Image: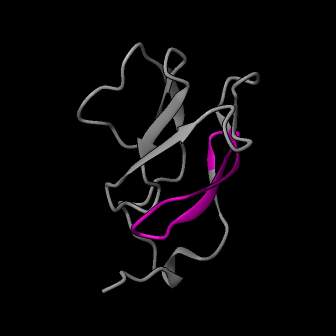
Amino acid sequence: MTDPARTKLYRAERVDAVPYPLAPGVLYVCEATGLVTHLCACGCEGLAATRLNRDGWSYDDAIGVPTIAPSILNHPCGAHYFIRAGAVVWVAAPELYQEVA
């Protein structure tokens, strides 16, 4: 069964500061801070922030759609995914994720 809250595609938006609230399906790219921020793809509404050029993360939108490498592991929900050419590619089936009590 597919969760309608789960994000399948992201688009990039360059910002000077990360807005609040965040919109689903948007990667906020802030070059001043070196952060790419978005709502978690699993639909939990958790914040996922990736610091570029640290621990090997990179961002590319040369073809007009965003790619972040390597994968994103979000806490505390445990969602683990790539964003490649704007699309969410799950490392494991999202149905396997469980809330940790």
User: Of helix, strand and loop, which mostly describes the magenta segment?
Assistant: strand
The residue lying at 43 percent from left, 60 percent from top is 6
Residue situated in front as seen by the camera: 7 or 32: 32
Q: Is residue 38 visible?
A: yes
- What colouring does the structure picture have? one colour
Quadrant in which the C terminus appears: bottom left
Magenta stretch, residue numbers: 68-87
Total numbered circles: 0
The residue lying at 35 percent from left, 60 percent from top is 5
Q: Is residue 61 magenta?
A: no
Q: Measured from the top left, where is residue 71 in percent x and y?
A: 67, 54
Left or right, 94 with reference to 53: left
Q: Is residue 25 visible?
A: no
Q: Measured from the top left, where is residue 97 in percent x and y?
A: 48, 79
**In this view, which residue lies farthest toward the front?**
55
Left or right, 72 with reference to 1: right
Q: Measured from the top left, where is residue 55 in percent x and y?
A: 69, 44
In the figure, residue 77 lies in which quadrant? bottom left
The residue lying at 41 percent from left, 13 percent from top is 16
22 is higher (above) or lower (below) than 96: above
The residue lying at 36 percent from left, 83 percent from top is 100
Q: Is residue 69 magenta?
A: yes
Left or right, 73 with reference to 65: left
60 is higher (above) or lower (below) than 42: above
In the figure, residue 44 lies in which quadrant? bottom left
